[in-house]
Image (cartoon, rainbow, N blue to C red):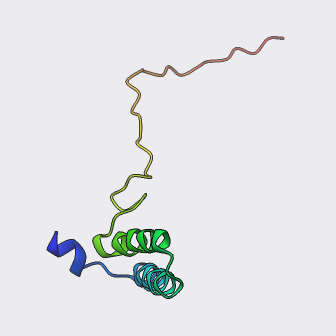
Amino acid sequence: MKSSTLTNWNFMRIVRLVLGIAIIVQSVFVKDWGMTVVGILFTSMPIFNIGCCANGGCSVSLKHSKLKTEEITYEEVV
């Protein structure tokens, strides 16, 4: 867990963290506690590197077909 929070930081992960902190700060100033919870959610996602595609959840698995394909031969009809 510690290694995932301290490594692999890229530009988008930092932007997501800054935006999450901005949501928290703005919601505390406005005293909108529901948005504070949303801000905590958005801040925890880049910290722990979780989300839709963080662990390869969006990759498409390849299906390997075990069916043998036969080459089709054509005859010329005159």
Q: What residue appears at the point 38 percent right and 82 percent down from the top-left corner?
A: 10
Residue 9, by quadrant, is bottom left
Q: Residue furthest left?
A: 2
Which residue is farthest top? 78
On-image quarter of the C terminus: top right
Instruction: Out of 9 and 21, give the one closest to the viewer.
Output: 21
Quarter that holds the N terminus: bottom left
Count of labels in the image: 0
Picture residue at 41% right of the left edge, 34% below the top: 63
Looking at the image, residue 33 lies above or below residue 59:
below
Image location (x, y in percent) of residue 13: 40, 78
Left/right placement of residue 12 relative to residue 77 reads left
Above-or-below relation of 5 to 71: below
Q: Quadrant of residue 17?
A: bottom left
Q: Position of residue 30 (x, y in %)?
A: 54, 84
Residue at the front extreme of this rendering: 31
Q: Nearer the viewer, residue 7 or 47?
A: 47
Residue 15 position within the rendered picture, expressed as x and y whole percent measured from the top left? 46, 83
Q: Position of residue 33 (x, y in %)?
A: 45, 73
Left or right: residue 71 compared with residue 6: right
Q: Which residue sits at x=48%, y=86%? A: 22
9 w.r.t. 44: above or below: below
